[in-house]
Structure formats: structure tokens, C-alpha cells
Image: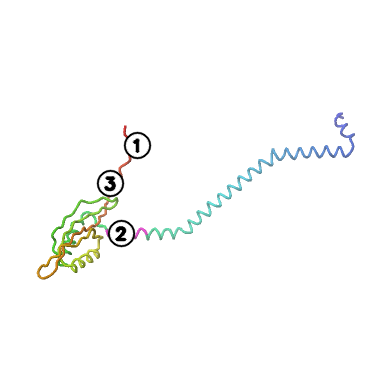
Amino acid sequence: MDARVEKILNLPAYQRMLIVLVVMVLIGVGFYFLVYQGQLEEHEKLVKKKVSVEKTLKKNQKIANNLELYKKEYEKLQAKLEEALGELPLKKEIPSLLTNIGALAKEKGLEILRFKPKGEVPKGFYAEVPVELKLRGSYHQAASFFAAVGNMERIVNIQNLKLGGAKTVAGRTALSIDCSAITYRFVENPPPKPSKKKGGKK
């Protein structure tokens, strides 16, 4: 028998128990660091991953549950956009639209002193089409003309309105009416925005 083993066996019982206890503790510590700690870290990773996956699933489920609502909202917005674009004439419709504005002025009894289309003002997917107007007529005739313009199928705004130069014509007071009638046309293929040049001046 090995002398060291024999020496241990000859020790008092409490000392032998103490040695066995120390050995068991060492084995337990070794097991913790070599096996259990690695498993614990792996378990924590799996728990975190599980929580992350659950959050993603809940988020996707919420989107899926509201998908029909989002679809209906999109369809409403699309319909509103098409309706708004429908109020913007194409380029080929502009001449007839301007003719209609002039015809309305005459229909309401106004005398057209100046009817001058100005250059278009690009605004991206649409462009402003201003017309400079100088009319003569009564206040009632002017108000009736502006109301008729506002009720046109296409959008036409009256801006820069100036009234003055009242004169008596054929026994009636006639005003000089200066204004701008601005309509808008849909730009089918808007030009791309110019790219900013990199770097400064040399």
C-alpha cells in the first residue's frame, strides 16, 4: 500500500472526513468552472435570444393584425392624391383653361383690358401658370366673376387683387380691376433635382 494512502488511513476519522470534504469542494469548483459556467453562459445567451425573437414576433404580429387597416388607409390616401391630381390640368389643357377664364370674365359683363399669360413657375410635380388680368366692371360683376372662377373644375386662385380707378360708364360706376389668376398644371415627368457639387471653389 502506498505510504501516503496508509498515512491518510491512519489519521483520525474527523481528519479523513475533512480531507474528503476538501476533495469534494475542489471537484465541485472544477465542475463549475469547466462545465456548469459554460452551460450557464450559453443558457443566458439563449434566454436573451428568446426574448429578442419574442419581441420581433410581437412586432410582426402587430403589423400583420393591422395590415388590412394600413391597406385601407393607403387606398384612401391614393384616392385623395388621384383626386387632387385630377384638379391639375395637363399641359395640353392649359390653353382651353385660360380661354375659359377669359370667357367667364366676359360672361359676367367685365371688359378685358389685359389678359397676359406669364411664364410657368416649376414647383416639382406641378407648375404654377399665372395670368395677369386687367378688367373693368362693377363690384358686383367682379365678385360674380371671382365666385365663378372659384367653382371651376380646375384649381384657379386669384391673387394680388387691386380695385381702383372708379369711372362712370353708361350711367354705371365701373372699377379698374387688377389681379393675377394662377392655375396649376401637373408635370408628368418633372426634371431631376440638380446634384450638389462636392468640394468648394479652388
Instruction: Describe the colour scheme in one phrase.
Output: rainbow
User: Foreground mark, 1 or 3?
Assistant: 1
Q: Circle 1 sits in a helix, a strand or a loop, which is it?
A: loop
Q: Quadrant of the C terminus?
A: top left
Look at label 2 and name its amino acid: Ala
Q: Dot 3: within a 10 Å radius of its alpha carbon, few (fewer than 14), some, or many (20 or more) residues?
A: few
Of the residues under marks 2 and 1, which one precedes in the sequence? 2
Residue 198, label in figure: 1
Return the x and y of residue 197 as percentages of the image width and height: 32, 38
Disc 2 from disc 1: Cα separation:
37 Å
Return the x and y of residue 96 as percentages of the image width and height: 18, 59
Q: Locate residue 89: give its quadrant.
A: bottom left
Q: Main secondary structure of the magenta part?
A: helix
Q: Is 184 left or right of 4, judged from the image as shown?
A: left
Q: Dot 1: within a 10 Å radius of its alpha carbon, few (fewer than 14), some, or many (20 or more) residues?
A: few
Residue 84, label in figure: 2
Look at label 1 and name its amino acid: Lys
Q: Which residue is mark 3?
A: 191
Look at label 3 and name its amino acid: Pro
